[in-house]
Image: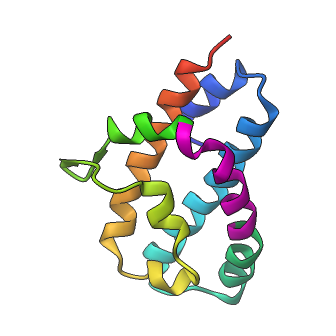
Amino acid sequence: MNPFTRSLLHRNTNVSLQTFVARWDALEALVIRVYRNGTASTADCDEHRALRPLLLLDYQRWREPLRPCWRAARCGSKPCEEDPFEFLLRVETPARFVGSWEHMQALPAAREALNRLLLETQP
């Protein structure tokens, strides 16, 4: 987990948000691993198959609170024009992450949005 996110999450008591962040961390790690390895292993496919439906369900709850956060983030060197969470969650098979610089650029924007939301929801 991102150290800054971990620090912010430690002070957050919203279990639903904690669960979403933990699942998002797992997806982020999977995307990076597949991109770096240049292939999606059977284990990666199994993990994605288990994780994606849960994140899609979780994201229904967090879509609107995260909207202003990702709009303030950057995708690569430009302001985000598309929801980075939806962009990454649309991927039905992790093989699509192989060689996809666009997906890699969406990860920091999503992380920044999560951190902004965690800052806004601090007790």
| Color scheme of the displayed model | rainbow
**Secondary structure of the magenta portion, mostly?**
helix
Tell me: residue 70, above or below residue 15.
below
The image shows residue 34 at horizontal and vertical percentages of 52, 76
Residue 60 inside the magenta-drawn segment:
yes
Residue 73 inside the magenta-drawn segment:
no
Tell me: residue 120, above or below residue 35.
above
Q: Residue at x 55, y 67 (%)?
A: 89
Apparent side of residue 57 relative to residue 3 in the rendered image (left or right) = right
Quarter of the figure with the N terminus: top right
The image shows residue 67 at horizontal and vertical percentages of 45, 41
Q: Residue at x 48, y 79 (%)?
A: 37
Q: Nearer the viewer, residue 21 or 60?
A: 60
Tell me: residue 12, above or below residue 6.
above
Apparent side of residue 16 relative to residue 36 in the rendered image (left or right) = right
Count of numbered badges drawn on the protein = 0
Q: Nearer the viewer, residue 54 or 102?
A: 54
Q: Residue at x 38, y 57 (%)?
A: 106
The image shows residue 8 at horizontal and vertical percentages of 61, 23
The image quadrant of residue 102 is: bottom left
Quarter of the figure with the C terminus: top right
The image shows residue 64 at horizontal and vertical percentages of 54, 40
Apparent side of residue 3 relative to residue 78 in the rendered image (left or right) = right
Tell me: residue 80, above or below residue 40.
above
Q: Nearer the viewer, residue 43 or 89?
A: 89
Q: Extreme left residue here?
A: 77
**Magenta extent:** 52-64
Apparent side of residue 65 relative to residue 101 in the rendered image (left or right) = right
